[in-house]
Image (tube, grey):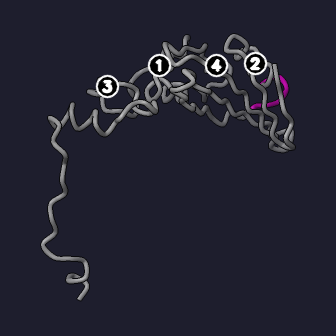
Amino acid sequence: MKGADTGRRIEVEVEPSQLRERLRRALEEGYDHFIGINVVDYPRAGVMEVYYFVESVQRGGELLVVKLRVPRENPALDSVSDIYPLAEYQEIEGHEFFGLDFRGNGSLRKWILDENWEGPPPLRKDVDTRKFVLETYYGGQRYERPKQEKSLQEVVE
């Protein structure tokens, strides 16, 4: 495990298999406030970086960032929602928007996207979400706003 101490922020990089143990240890060490999970997609490298942010109130707000990489093809991690319950909804977002499978999270479902969304995970960098929506839901037609009869200047005067 590599790590860097940058003042009130400590960053560690772990293998996916070490994630649960590292976060369990973080909780025991006083990092009791779960902040969130961020996912960064790197299509050319074939990986996604996943960042977990936890904070220690008793250590004056010290932040621990746990970073790991997963392959873009069939990305999967073990859920940490039993360690940090607030991670449950962050994992749902990661699943919905990036296609990450959080093993052990029984709540993975459509949460923010429309129930009829059957497309690729929309926040992956190689997905043209706009094109997909236009082709799938609007038959390829671009939605145009109706033209205004008067300009803003004419309305103001």
Q: Nearer the viewer, mark 3 or mark 1?
A: 3
The answer to which of marks 4 and 3 sits earlier in the sequence is 4
Residue linked to disc 1: 107
Looking at the picture, does residue 30 appear above or below residue 69? below
Q: Residues within 10 Å of mark 4 (few under 14, many from 20)?
A: many
Residue linked to disc 3: 119
Q: Residue at (64%, 17%) from the top-left corner?
A: 82
Q: Quadrant of residue 68?
A: top right
Q: Residue at (86%, 39%) from the top-left corner?
A: 59
Circle 1: residue type: Ser
The answer to which of marks 2 and 1 sits earlier in the sequence is 2
Residue linked to disc 2: 24
Residue numbers of the magenta segment: 27-32
Circle 4: residue type: Val
Q: Position of residue 44 (x, y in %)?
A: 53, 26
Q: CA distance from mark 3 to mark 1?
A: 20 Å
Q: Secondary structure at mark 4?
A: loop
Q: Position of residue 6 (x, y in %)?
A: 85, 41
